[in-house]
Image: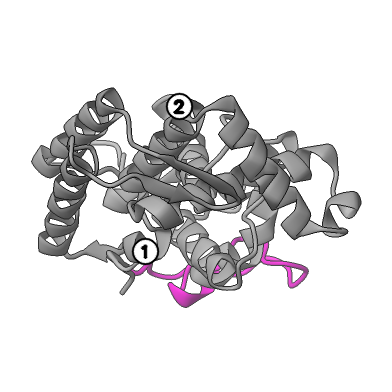
Amino acid sequence: MQADTSPDNPQAQDDSGDDYADEIATFFLALRGSGLFLSPADSALIVEWREAGLPLATVLAGLHRGAARLLKRQRPLRSLRSVRRDVLNEARRRGRVPRDDERNGPSQEVEVAPPPAFEYDKVRSLVRAHIDALESLSSTDAPRLSLVGSPRTFGIPRPLVRRTSAALNEILEADDFGPGGPVSLLLELGRDFYEELWASLEDSARAEVDAFLRQSLGERLKTMSAEARDETLRELESRALRESVGLFNPIELFELWRAP
């Protein structure tokens, strides 16, 4: 009898190098748009979900819904715990209640709903539109883009365009998007794109934008820990560039994922 290695089998993920935790971490960091590693508390929460029997597809769908909810409220996605409730709600919605749900004691698992579906024609159309837009923005006669909080303008480096376009073409040709689907791949690619674009700006331009963002946060900066402050500023930096460039918009990407 062949072992069940589907994303809805957390134990199978353990047996194949802990793909369960890796997929969740990769997807979450792509959603957040910053950072390379999870905090110990977030890593512990993944273990909690795995031990509770939550399928991988359910957790990813819950993260997606939670990130979309926070984005619409213009609140930063800082940790897995900030969307923990969304993951549990997704489990209930799919009829997959954790074995130890909240404080209500053990409960019986029932049949799982299918994982989210993607409209692949829309996915490929959006990817092609991104490729065309990159080529247009990086052409020799393309207008310079404005930068929030700074009188300076900027362009997109040609090498960055080539690398990003190549990655988008790989997505076009992919047969398997993985448990996180094209949303995960495009969010991760967008995070890398804006991080590299930010690094390509002149030091003085980055300093002006940083000062503007700190001023816009005002007194809230004083109430944040150093880690929360840095994460918030990185997210706002990425958002500032995204507003100018117009690519890899999370809300637009979330529209590709319509959970049943």
Quarter holding the N terminus is top left
Residue highlighted by disc 2: 200
Left or right, 128 with respect to 233, comes to left
* Magenta stretch, residue numbers: 92-113
Relative vertical location of residue 217 with respect to residue 28 in this rendering, above or below: below
Of residues 72 and 233, the one drawn nearer to the viewer in this rendering: 233
Would residue 71 be seen by someone viewing this image from the given angle? yes
Q: Residue furthest front?
A: 151
Left or right, 20 with respect to 81, comes to left
**Amino acid tagged 2:** Ser
At which x and y percent is residue 230? 72, 39
At which x and y percent is residue 216? 73, 59
Residue occupying image coordinates x 74% and y 72%: 104
- Which picture quadrant has residue 6? top left
**Label 1 to label 2, Cα distance in Å?**
28 Å
Instruction: State yes or no: residue 202 in magenta.
Output: no
Of residues 203 and 119, the one drawn nearer to the viewer in this rendering: 203
Q: Secondary structure at mark 2?
A: helix
Quarter holding the C terminus is bottom left
Residue occupying image coordinates x 19% and y 35%: 165
Relative vertical location of residue 7 with respect to residue 89 in this rendering, above or below: above
At which x and y percent is residue 100? 67, 61
Instruction: State yes or no: residue 111 in magenta.
Output: yes
Front tag of 1 and 2: 2
Of residues 129 and 181, the one drawn nearer to the viewer in this rendering: 129
Alpha-carbon neighbours of circle 2 within 10 Å: few (<14), some, or many (≥20)? some
Residue highlighted by disc 1: 254
